[in-house]
Image: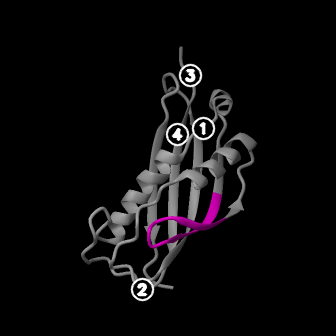
Amino acid sequence: MTSTGISKSAFIALIVGGISLTGAASAGQPDTMQDWQSAADKSISKAMSVPTLTNRQGSSGYAQFAVTVNRDGEVINSTQTIRARNSGLNNAALRAVRRVDFPALPESYDAEQLTFTLNLDYQSSSGVSGLKRLRTGNVEVATGR
């Protein structure tokens, strides 16, 4: 018997200026913005979850947030700019933004905070056995204003 699973993607488009893509970092910090992007992808994918009922229904949805993090990677502001039409997925997106643990910004990043667009995409996927959930993430950094 085939059941439906949810494939999740997180796309983070960063709106930044003056990014240096090289430089040394402290222990535990990404070395470059590219490293930060990769770590942020993993963090948001890990924070995303799908309510059981929504998973069984095979619902899909998309939510978008404007997010600002400080140098330590702590979310200091988030505003939902697009709501998922499915309330269960929208609530899951809100929870993901509240509990995500973004990495600290690299020392090479020269500002005190970073504002970016966070896109959370929940897609149903037929043919995935059981409740296996597939997650992928993608961060895109703009290097100019």
- Crowding at dot 1, Cα within 10 Å, few <14 / some 14-19 / many 20+, comes out as many
Of helix, strand and loop, which one carries label 4? strand
User: Which mark's residue is nearer the viewer, 4 or 1?
Assistant: 1
The answer to whether residue 141 is left or right of residue 48 is: left
Taking 69 as reference, is 112 above or below it?
Answer: below
Q: Are marks 3 and 1 in contact (CB under 8 Å)?
A: no
Q: Are marks 2 and 3 in contact (CB under 8 Å)?
A: no
Q: Which residues are magenta?
A: 64-78
Which amino acid type is marked by label 4? Answer: Ser
Say which residue label 4 marks.
7
| Cα gap from disc 3 to disc 1, whole angstroms | 15 Å
User: Which mark's residue is nearer the viewer, 2 or 3?
Assistant: 2
| Cα gap from disc 2 to disc 4, whole angstroms | 34 Å
Q: Are marks 3 and 4 in contact (CB under 8 Å)?
A: no
Comes first in the chain, label 2 or label 3: 3
Q: Would you identify the image quadrant in which residue 60 lies?
A: top right
Say which residue label 2 marks.
18
As rendered, which of 19 and 85 lies closer to the eye? Answer: 19
As rendered, which of 107 and 39 lies closer to the eye? Answer: 107
Say which residue label 1 marks.
50
The answer to whether residue 20 is left or right of residue 3 is: left
